[in-house]
Image (cartoon, rainbow, N blue to C red):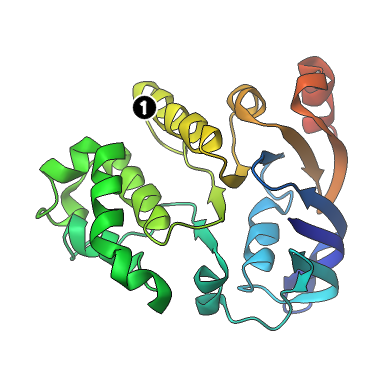
Amino acid sequence: MIEIRDVRAGYGSINILWDVSLSVPKGKLTTIIGPNGAGKTTLLRTIMGIVPASAGTITLDGQALAGTPTWDMPGLGMVMIPEGRMIFKDMTVEENLMLGAFPRSKRAEAKTRLEHAYAMFPRLRERRKQAAGTLSGGEAQMVAMARGLMSDPRVLIIDEPSLGLAPVIVNELFQTLARLKDEGRTIILVEQSTHRAVGVADQVYLMQTGRVVLDMPASEVDMERLHDLYFAH
């Protein structure tokens, strides 16, 4: 579904990604793990057009994404849930969610999608008129997840969803990811918890210093070897 081939990208004169290649099959959960500074978030931003690729290609169902503005990505069925949630704190929970139905083709379904979001995250229905800035970290992550689902995306890109959350909330979060996977969503997940990431994934990529150093089905991953590579210098 998504093919990334020999991509280089970075910030100004600083290159971060070095000839990165990976495939994201339709209906599967692909996880990308690696230490801080490995280039994981830069890769996600490059897929979404936030960071331009200086070399290589990224395609969605064979269609090149180069030059596609980030704000047009939801119309193609691609949504990113960023690290740190990035919700609008002065707006209500419901206003944040409605912003997720941004593509014109999805606006007619917004009320229906809103009900689906509340069914998936019942706590948000209770807080729908509450300012998003008053929510707990776990509730804010629910808002970010639900907002991303409001356009009914074909591809869901999720960056570090468990960061800073209590274990009980992380458990709920990964149960939600498992449900989305069972629905047949195509998911790209960057996650700091290797055990949880591998446990929910179909395919695993490990990045080090802007390069992919491991690529294999999650069912074949040896966690001891994975951690040896993860912490290698």
Q: Give the image quarter of residue 171.
A: top left
Q: Residue at x 42, y 56 (%)?
A: 148
Q: Which residue is mark 1?
A: 166
In this rendering, does residue 65 appear at all?
A: yes
Q: Is residue 193 above or below residue 56?
A: above
Q: Secondary structure at mark 1?
A: loop
Q: Quadrant of the N terminus?
A: bottom right
- Image spot of residue 108 (x, y percent): 30, 70
Q: Residue at x 66, y 40 (%)?
A: 28
- Image spot of residue 52 (x, y percent): 71, 77
Please state if 201 lies on the left or on the right of 108 as rendered.
right
Closest to the observer, 153 or 166:
153
Q: Quadrant of the C terminus?
A: top right
Closest to the observer, 30 or 207:
30
Please state if 12 lies on the left or on the right of 147 as rendered.
right
Q: Give the image quarter of residue 95.
A: bottom left
What amino acid does circle 1 point to? Ala
Please state if 104 lies on the left or on the right of 178 as rendered.
left
- Image spot of residue 128 (x, y percent): 14, 51
Closest to the observer, 105 or 92:
105
Closest to the observer, 101 or 88:
101
Q: Residue at x 74, y 47 (%)?
A: 25
- Image spot of residue 119 (x, y percent): 26, 39
